[in-house]
Amino acid sequence: MTSEQTLCFDTIIAGGTVIDGTGAPGQRADVGLVGDRITAVGNLDGAHAGKQIDATGLTVAPGFIDCHTHDDGYLLTSPDMSAKVSQGVTSVVIGNCGISLAPTFGRPPAPPMNLLGADELFKFKTFSGFLEALDDTPAAVNALPLVGLTTLRRSIMDDLEKAATRDEVAAMRKLFEEALEAGVLGYSTGLFYPNAAASTPQEVVGVAEPAKGMDIVYATHLRNEADYIMPALEEAFSIARRLQSRLVLSHHKLIGVQNHGRATETLGRVHRQRLTQDIALDLYPYTAGSSVLNLKTVEDTERVVVSWSDPHPEMAGRDLEEVCAEWELPLDATIERLSPAGGILFMMAEKDVQEILRYEATMIGSDGLPNDKFPHPRLWGTFPRILGHYSRDLGLIDLPEAVHRMTGLTAQVFGLTDRGRIAPGCKADVTLFDAVRVRDRADWATPTEPAEGIAHVLVNGTTVWTEGQSTGARPGQTVRRG
């Protein structure tokens, strides 16, 4: 170290074991930060800094990137983002499953758009206007935006139960092009949901035609994740090829008892396709999902818990079967009376979750719904659950690989060249955790309990979580393509 280097650091993270996000083994090193960048990694004994963080006994990792969220509105209404920073997350990908907060034209959001928040949040006529609002009122974490097809449909179409006409596709394409110029990292669809189920592959591709050759992400909630998952995969492969986009298969899973154990089949098909196509997938580490409540979403479920209900908020946390019995109504009438509503849906097998997690191209995404009154515990627990339960306790993947799946791999898939690694020149998004103690405490009974073992979280060089609480700092940045 030269004498000049001793004066360079605003912060030194000293004495920790650095796991750099590449999958490489951890090594003892100090990390020097200047402004919002990492400027040195190594032995910084004798260096001076305005602030020093003692990382003795801790793992120093890149800040976790939550690759699948519905935090579009949460960034604006709860900018401390405690549900995320408390588990080490420093960046969130928004606009998944075809639903983004923009662009909209004053119409009430169509389900599942209402998962993003209250009607008044849907006020941005352009995607650039939404991103400017994030710039003007930054949150504690970075925002990585996608634009959603269902939102584009709602902006243009009166009848979402039909395929778009040629003129409607052209109108949506103009909105998509504006979002692309604003800097979105990709495009998402939720072809499973009723308001996009009528979309044809021609519509999906036609809307996003301006992105061809621009190497953006196409993230999709498959048209079917149950009995017809194989043709749904083929459709996704075809759309991404036609768009010349990187494909992300959102929250890959197998729904319904009759499909439990099919992860070997689906992963085998994905693996063969990856020989000629750029494909990744993401996972939340639970056997239950969460979504809007309707007859389609509760198909093939073993149990449903009401997570929220506008007309009957007192039913949040109750089993749907119990509500049916109490009201003496059949399932369809009960759902209609509860709606608009959401539910926690128990529908997957643990053996499939574990097999998908072991797969080399699987990223980690919470798919949490921050506006639910009784949320799925994945909102607060996803990342420490991977580190503690699945990596340390079960040994499904080792710690450097677990960190890689939530940092370096995700950065690579979404085209982030300066995040997801502990290396000079990278943004100073850093999570310090105790590898022995880290665990999720959010569960089905207490879904909003912060994780244990997350010591310090820095976003762009500023501490946002320490000693078990938010600092109130809001240094997040809106990350645009290019």
Image: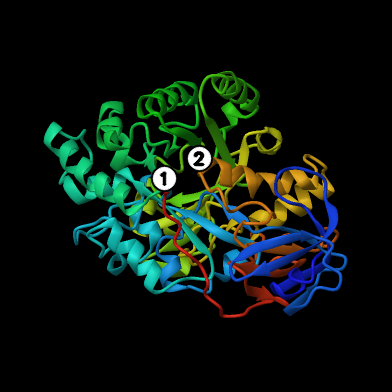
Q: Nearer the viewer, residue 204 or 127?
A: 127
Q: Is residue 433 left or right of residue 448?
A: right
Q: Amino acid at mark 1?
A: Cys
How far is disc 1 from disc 2 in space, using C-alphas?
A: 8 Å
Q: Are marks 1 and 2 in contact (CB under 8 Å)?
A: yes
Residue picked out by circle 1:
97
Q: Residues within 10 Å of mark 2 (few under 14, many from 20)?
A: many
Measured from the top left, where is residue 171 in percent x and y?
16, 42
Residue found at x 44% / y 66%? 74
User: Residue 220: percent from the left, percent from the top?
Assistant: 43, 38
Q: Nearer the viewer, residue 212 or 204?
A: 212
Rendered view: 361 above or below 343: above
Q: Residue at x 61, y 25 (%)?
A: 267
Position above or below: 467 against 227 = below
Nearer-N-terminus badge (1/2): 1
> For residue 352, which quarter of the picture?
top right
Q: Secondary structure at mark 1?
A: helix
Q: How is the image coloured?
A: rainbow
Residue 52's quadrant in the figure? Answer: bottom right
Q: Quadrant of the N terminus?
A: bottom right
Residue 250 image label: 2
Q: Residue at x 61, y 64 (%)?
A: 37
Q: Residues within 10 Å of mark 1 (few under 14, many from 20)?
A: many
